[in-house]
Image (cartoon, rainbow, N blue to C red):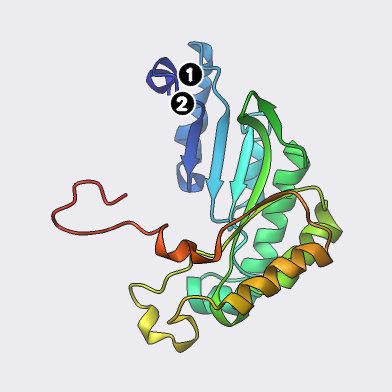
């Protein structure tokens, strides 16, 4: 982390960090003692332990969770986890209580806040309306949301007929209309064609697939 700071990075990004939390928190403590000043980003799939998140209070500057499903059944079917919607609601609420709904910038760089990512899935498997309704009614309509259209079927998706295609324009437009319905005006939306561009090109002749 200190090496990254010396190379003028903007932040320290912790990706899916929950299962390494003890080591991470100790490392941050040691790094701060030695001059770490960079914002800490907690980048997660949203299926987090509230008990663990509480340990990151006053440590994490920016929370960047996914909110994948508004339905426990689809979370179980597609991601093999129990009670995704209920657990994600508790986790995101804890994040909100820690950092609020305002994004704080230094120049053009976010240094504190909460950004919720939501990937639109075919056949409304993401249950976007339930996700947006929860954010607007139980958290804050001022929260920044990143709505993504880049879903691309890969790996074992061909075995699941409901996810074995990209999303349709009508499906994406419906989700964008829901943002307006719930007065969720802060954040970003991807171009509909994003699934063509936001995919790593995994080939044997490419050292860097990105």
Q: Position of residue 159 (x, y in %)?
A: 37, 86
Cα distance between the residues tagged 2 and 1: 5 Å
User: Quick check: can you spot residue 80?
Assistant: no
**Label for residue 27?**
2
**Tag 2 and tag 1, C-beta contact below 8 Å:** yes
Residue most extreme to the top: 34
Quarter of image, res 87: bottom right
Apparent side of residue 153 relative to residue 18 in the rendered image (left or right) = left
Residue most extreme to the left: 205
Residue nearer the viewer, 41 or 82: 41
Q: Residue at x 43, y 85 (%)?
A: 160
Q: Position of residue 71 (x, y in %)?
A: 66, 75
Q: Residues within 10 Å of mark 1 (few under 14, many from 20)?
A: few
Helix or strand or loop: what does disc 1 sit on?
helix
Q: Position of residue 135 (x, y in %)?
A: 77, 58
For label 1, the residue is 30
Task: Tell me if residue 3 comes above or below residue 89 in the rendering.
Answer: above
Q: Residue at x 48, y 11 (%)?
A: 34
């Amino acid at each position: 982390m200190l090496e990254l700071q010396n190379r003028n990075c903007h932040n320290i990004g912790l990706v899916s960090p929950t299962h390494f939390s003890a080591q991470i928190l100790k490392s941050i403590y040691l790094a701060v003692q030695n001059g770490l000043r960079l914002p800490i980003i907690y980048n997660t799939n949203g299926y987090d332990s509230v008990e663990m998140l509480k340990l990151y209070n006053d440590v994490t500057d920016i929370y960047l969770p996914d909110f994948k499903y508004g339905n426990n059944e689809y979370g179980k079917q597609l991601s093999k986890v129990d009670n995704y919607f209920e657990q994600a609601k508790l986790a995101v609420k804890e994040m909100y209580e820690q950092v609020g709904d305002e994004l704080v910038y230094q120049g053009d760089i976010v240094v504190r806040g909460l950004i919720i990512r939501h990937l639109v899935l075919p056949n409304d498997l993401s249950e976007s309306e339930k996700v947006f309704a929860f954010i607007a009614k139980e958290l804050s309509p001022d929260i920044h949301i990143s709505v993504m259209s880049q879903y691309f079927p890969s790996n074992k998706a061909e075995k699941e007929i409901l996810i074995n295609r990209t999303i349709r324009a009508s499906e994406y437009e419906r989700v964008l209309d829901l943002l307006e319905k719930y007065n969720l005006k802060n954040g970003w939306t991807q171009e509909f064609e994003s699934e063509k561009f936001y995919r790593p090109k995994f080939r044997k002749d490419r050292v860097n697939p990105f």
